[in-house]
Image (cartoon, rainbow, N blue to C red):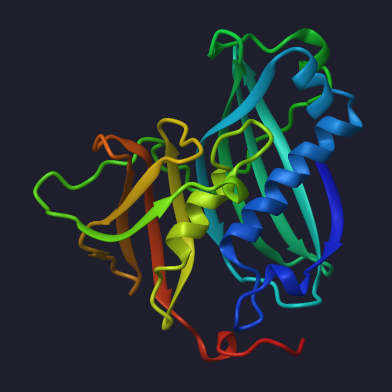
Amino acid sequence: MYSFEDRIRYSEVDEHGLLRSESLINYFQDCSTFQSEDGHVGIRYLVDRHYAWVVNYWQIEVRRYPVLGERVITATNPYELRGFMGLRNFSMDSADGERLAEANSVWSLINLDKMVPAIVPPEMSRVYELGEKFSDMEYLPRKILLPKDAVPQRVSRIEVGESHLDSNHHLNNAQYVRFVMQLVPEEQIVCGMRVEYKKQALLGDTIDILAYPAEMTGTGEKKVPISMNGSDGKAFACMELTLRPRRPDEESAWVL
């Protein structure tokens, strides 16, 4: 398990003073990046060898969003390296040990010259000491099935700009989430999400965000399937949001 301590910044919270969903993903990504950097297999190592880690799938469960100024501990637990694939859990805890959020993720190592998967080299795999996968998570299917008998509604259209790109020159995976979070109704809050990435969106690409009818659950939550399509109608990513009503204590959380 690798972890780092930090404090929630003003630039990371929404109008209610809660950590944004895309900022949570950034904490998780930063945690795995710090582990790689500390093990000397970070960005420079990857660039020199024309490699890149690409995320294929996120499953994130949020119990409580931390508030402005709150101190948190973010951790990552690589639990399987197989061929070109790496599987990781992530968690965010409060300073006193309260579990705030946890995640499962699937990554692929890509050879950028040939744009094909690359076997994880031994000097890299040695850095990622494997632990046991989180036992308290319900691991949902990685493939997100969109309703075949429902007509989606286009709720937004986005053009990928330079500010949306990461060091691999494609749309950063947290940006997909940010685009969708802007469309969540004010009275709702995201308590879970799955994201399946299908192909890379590049500078100048247009993304149509298509929302399917929500499915109600027995717990009062609702699940909303979403497809983020290119101009050719093919999906860059599919997403499933789990929404619940915003609680009174989440209306204004500026004071701890």
Q: From the image, which quarter does the N terminus lie in?
A: top right
Q: Residue furthest left?
A: 149
Residue 49 rendering spot, x and y as whole percentages: 75, 12
Identify whether 256 is placed above or below 80: below
Q: Is residue 225 above or below residue 86?
A: below
Q: Residue 167: x, y in percent?
A: 69, 35
**Which one is in front, 87 or 187?**
187
Q: How many marks?
A: 0
Q: Quadrant of residue 9?
A: bottom right
In front here: 164 or 254? 164
Left/right placement of residue 128 relative to residue 138 reads: right
Q: Nearer the viewer, residue 71 or 254?
A: 254
Percent of width and height locating residue 191:
49, 66
Q: At 65% from the left edge and 70% from the top edge, which residue is drawn?
A: 19
Measured along the vertical axis of the image, is residue 127 above or below residue 194?
Answer: above
Residue found 56% across the figure and 35% down from its top: 170
Q: Is residue 175 left or right of residue 45?
A: left
Q: Relative to residue 220, is residue 168 depicted above or below?
A: above
Which residue lies at the image location 81% right of the left edge and 31% below the top edge? 36
Q: Quarter of the image containing the C terminus?
A: bottom right
Q: Position of residue 233 (x, y in %)?
A: 24, 38
Determine whether, in the image, residue 151 is placed left or right of residue 170: left
Q: Is residue 150 visible?
A: yes
The residue positioned 77% from the left and 37% from the top of the image is 33
Q: Is residue 42 visible?
A: no
Choose between 4 and 110: the one closer to the eye: 110
